[in-house]
Amino acid sequence: MVNLLQRLGFLLALVTSLACAQAHADALSDIIKHEKIKVGVSLFTPWTIQSSKGKLAGFEIDIAKKIAADMGVEVEFKVYPWEKIMPALQKGEIDFIAAGMAITPKRALRVDFTQPYSESGVTLATHTANTKDINSLIELNKESVVIAAVQDTIGGDLAASVFDKATLTYFETPQLAEAAVLEGKAQGYVASEAMARIFAMTHADTVDLPLPERLLTYKIAFAVSKGEQPLLNFLNAWIVSRTADRWIPATESFWFDSLEWQEAQ
């Protein structure tokens, strides 16, 4: 009798667990039902840019709008500081993250990644005048040199290993890190290649990209909550389709290979 009750208890717990998992893993149905998809973004130029009036633009904004249009639903953007965007996904505040997020094993413990839809890397932007006499990374890696980075990013983590002897200064936002370089408070800034390139193009008289190659290359993907397989399947299919018809590469080129988009802001 005891064994039977134990088995029944185990089966009940298993059924309950499966039911909860099924209820949780139904974000795609909820999106279709409510005709709205909630997308989490973070402010990293040119991934996502916010004007003084609050208007959003950028590569990820165009991406999410296209996804919503292909689904036949509206899109609602929610802007988060970088360190709060994954917790927001885990809490169910958003359906997926579109924020130039690099795929890493550590992050994959917390979220499920789609296949990559873009590639980027980490590089170094420097204050031209303040580094004109420096000819190598070794010369930058000393205590008298200040290197800026954004906390909790791939660039920030890499800066700690590449410039282990330099004075590292971490900032909450890319804007603050860039300002430190422009004001001469930091000689270098370790950041995503895309952000560093835009930074250098925008301030060509002050900022340089001295390295011929990336410090690190990584793949970028959307992130969804654990177990959201139907939504993951849809996003993967969307990536395959929009890569094949060249929509993603064309949109990426517009945002990353020139400053034409600045004229429309």
Image: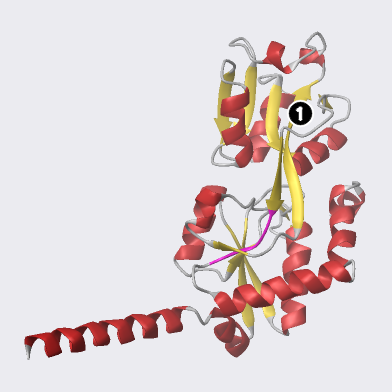
Depth order, front residue of 199/143? 143
- Residue in the picture at 57% in, 23% down: 168
Task: Tell me, yes or no, if residue 144 can be seen here.
Answer: yes
Task: Decide: is 101 above or below 138.
Answer: below
Q: Is residue 66 magenta?
A: no
Residue 128 lies in quadrant: top right
Point out residue 41 in the picture as x, y percentages from the top left corner: 63, 59
Task: Decide: is 252 above or below 195.
Answer: below
Q: Main secondary structure of the magenta part?
A: strand
Task: Decide: is 203 above or below 256.
Answer: above
Point out residue 138 in the picture as x, y percentages from the top left corner: 69, 13
Q: Which residues are magenta?
A: 220-224
Does dot 1 land on a helix, a strand or a loop?
strand
Point out residue 139 in the picture as x, y percentages from the top left corner: 71, 11
Reading the image, the residue beneath label 1 is 125
Extreme left residue here? 1
Give the number of marks.
Answer: 1
Depth order, front residue of 126/261? 126
| Image color mode | secondary structure
- Residue in the picture at 67% in, 38% down: 175
In the shown orientation, is residue 139 left or right of residue 110?
A: right
- Residue in the picture at 75% in, 46% down: 120
Task: Tell me, yes or no, if residue 57 can be seen here.
Answer: no
- Residue in the picture at 54% in, 50% down: 105
Point out residue 225 in the picture as x, y percentages from the top left corner: 51, 67
Q: Amino acid at mark 1?
A: Ala
**The N terminus sits in image quarter:** bottom left
Residue 249 lies in quadrant: bottom right
